Image: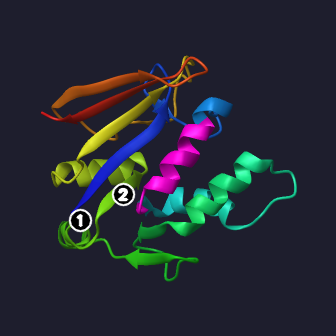
Amino acid sequence: MATLVFGMNMSLDGYVDHEGFAPGPGLFRHFIDQAREQVGGVYGRRLYEIMGYWDDDHDEWGEAEREFAQAWRRQHKWVVSRTLTSVGPNASLVGDDLERAMPALKAEVDGEIEVGGPKLAHSLTELGLIDAYRIYLHPVVLGGGDPYFAGPRPRLRLAASEPMGEDVIRLTYVPA
């Protein structure tokens, strides 16, 4: 059975923004290793389109970026969207019936599946389907943007905390 894990970089004031701050080399290495271990990811349309950046090679990439792209491309992606009619390589389009599709996916797949995007994570949280939340807490204050929790914070219990280099702490929470 699969586990659904929502993990994202977060500012001290609770926001996620891929343009507001980025992981340093040590944390990026962690994300490469994590991508190699995960069986796939469930993405909302917006984050899936942002992550599509990794589908094509870029001349300016270093070795780490090429490694991440290779690991990400290997993973299967399940894309939740009401508006997309097709998705890219190694991806499947999931309709908006999360209540039916996600429990079936969890039953069919073994391993960890990343949940991408706060709005999608909120919908899956309301259905009781998120198994863990990983907050990569960065020492920055954004003052606005998309909040990590797109709705009321679920009841959680701290399961682990770990320094991740470059002044980042990973906090792992599970439903209480």
> Residue at point 64% right, 62% down?
70
Residue 113: numbered disc = 2
Q: Give the range drawn in magenta.
A: 28-41
Is the residue 27 above or below the residue 1 in the image? above
Q: What residue type is labelled 1?
A: Lys
Colour scheme of this structure image? Answer: rainbow
Q: Locate residue 131 relative to residue 149 in the image: left or right.
A: left
Res. 106 mark: 1
Q: Does the magenta stretch include residue 34?
A: yes
Name above or below for residue 50 compared with residue 94.
Answer: above
Which is the main secondary structure of the residues drawn in magenta? helix
Quarter of the view holding residue 27: top right
Which image quarter: residue 6?
Answer: top left
Single out the residue that lies furthest toward the left. 176
Q: How far apart are marks 2 and 1 (CA)?
A: 9 Å
For this rendering, which residue is in front, 71 or 84? 71
Where in the figure is residue 169, as x and y percent of width and height?
46, 22
Q: Which residue is drawn at 87% across and 57% down?
A: 59
Secondary structure state at the residue bearing disc 1: helix
Q: Where is residue 55 in the image (x, y as percent from the top left)?
A: 67, 67
